[in-house]
Image (cartoon, helix red, strand yellow):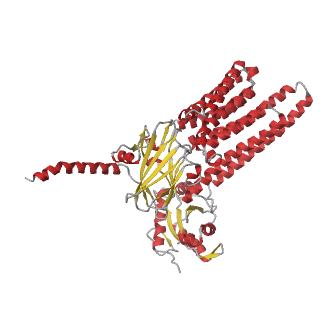
Amino acid sequence: MDWKAAARAPACLAWLGLALLLCAGVLQARPVELPAGTNQLSLTPHLQYRHDSGAADGIADAIGHLRAGRFQPVPGGNATFGFQPGAFWFHAAIINRNADEQRWLLVQEYPLSDRLDVWIRYPDGRMHHQAGGDHLPFGARSVRYRHPNFRLDLPPGEQVELLVRVESESSMQVPLELYTPASFTEVSRDAQFAIGLYYGILLALFFYNLVLWISLRDSSYFWYLFHITAFGLVLFTLNGLGFEYLWPNWPWFADKSVPLSICLALVGMNQFTRNFLELPQRWPAGNLASLTVIGFFVLFGLASFWLPYRIATPVAALAVLVGIAWIVGATIRVVRLGYEPAKLLLLAWGAFLMGTAVFTLLAFGVLPKNFFTEYGVQIGSALEMLLLSIALGYRYASLRNENERIAAEANLMLERKVAQRTNEVRSALLQLEEAHARLHESSRRDGLTGLYNRTWFQKAFDRMLGEGRARGQPVSLLMVDLDHFKAINDRHGHLTGDQCLRWAAGRIAGAAGGDALVARFGGEEFVVALPRTGRKDALALAEGIRRALAAAPCEANGHSLRISASIGVHTIQADADCDVDAAFEVADRAMYEAKAGGRNCVRSPGGAALARPQ
């Protein structure tokens, strides 16, 4: 018997067990794949996490816990945990299948995290580390943007491991998104536009009521202006814009600004309510309670300079709910006392309370992060401030009606002022409605070409398929991809490429005709949906598009460029069991057959090329 071999057997088994454990740790998380053509991906549903309650683990410890299987999937695919001590570790394995995009941007779409550390581990063992968060100067960020962000190098076809450590005394919200640079530019532009629209509303209300305060000298307008300014500062801080524009090199104040601005806003709210409801005359006990609340927020705002952030911010967040609840309660009491203008005030504070409650519950991890919970406070506050402005008008009208019994001349002056203010409010509301209509239309259009965007096209195409089935008529889908377009961008620059895209969009839309639904699908790809069109007519129209593109060169930035396209055609019969995704897949496959067949041609599924380049 080989006693040495027998002695080595337990050691071999131990090493084998450790290897299996390491493999299990690596394989427990399915890699996240970035498909070809993808330009944005939410990492949050694919993350695993571990709560390091003592904030003591380093990167080596985290890797050990990962390999030992101590990371677990993010609950419900939503990385919102409320106010928690310690640090959170997140892990994802990523494979980049998009050979055209190696550089990506990782964005944490929550601006108030104190410290973020990001490690990328490559297959050859290399480890790359980056740090961010509002405890570092704003200039340390990869891109100057209100959300922490990090540049990632993801080599195509290689699996890399991403480890993110987040430590914060603020609410633990870690929505992680991957963007290509171009996609991030578009998303950030749209987000900044929406925020700018909100602050535009605030500025319009501010200056409008500033003029009224200067002319009428009513203290209610002054406290309304104080409230608008203070609450605008709150949202400026919570959205990360304060750190970006006001104190980028002052991380200490970035923390203190959150509870401080909240206290200022609540002082303005309560003082405005006291004044508007005339509490000293109508409800003296309620007036005393309001003064007590105001005193608390003044003292707490001063104390926030010394209190730890982990204490000041959760208390301030809860105090918002308590403060607004008190305002609503006081307003209800005054309504019951018969003061009519208080009804509009109650409606305004109710809208604000709802938006604030949603935002606070998100901060404490009770509600998941989505558009309505993230921007609920903006929506609620916009409604509240509009209604407060109207309530001020209504209150002033009530005072005017009381003064009618005293002097007819004073009554006439008041009527003119109210009519003027009503017209101004109506004009402001009409402008807001027009802006909303323009925003709705722009959300359907591609910003570069003016064609419909992909999201709206998919919905419209789905309706078109349903109508075709109902009427027993075929529907055809064309996938149009410009040939060798990357070479234009590489050789002549993206500005020239953008002009070529606009030129091609015009040619495609013109050749498609009035009944066609034309959209930019992404990059240099376009889609055309043809109602009531069979295969033969669709192929003919596709050939017309191909000829229209190839007929004349595109003149862009002093360059004369020949542009051709490969077109895939798919016709869906009325009795076919085919949904939107399946139709896109078949048309896309036909388009790639056209590319494989020499480009500058039209193909239907399995068919021969209808035209070849000259």
Name which residue lies at 55% across and 44% down: 135
Name which residue lies at 73% across and 35% down: 224
Residue 577 appears left or right of 227: left
In percent of width and height, residue 168 lies at 51, 40
User: Is 169 placed above or below 23 here?
Assistant: above
User: Is 386 placed above or below 593 here?
Assistant: above
Q: Based on the displayed image, in which of its 4 quarters is residue 382 positioned?
A: top right
In percent of width and height, residue 371 lies at 57, 44
In percent of width and height, residue 357 lies at 58, 34
Residue ranking furthest to the top:
285
In the depicted view, which residue is nearer to us: 522 or 82? 82
In the depicted view, which residue is nearer to us: 336 or 548? 336
User: Is 224 placed above or below 558 here?
Assistant: above
Name which residue lies at 86% across and 34% down: 415
The answer, for residue 254, to whether it is visible in the render is: yes
Q: Based on the displayed image, in which of its 4 quarters is residue 504 positioned?
A: bottom right
User: Is 46 placed above or below 273 here?
Assistant: below
The answer, for residue 343, to whether it is visible in the render is: no
Residue ranking furthest to the left:
1
Residue 352 appears left or right of 100: right
Name which residue lies at 68% across and 31% down: 267
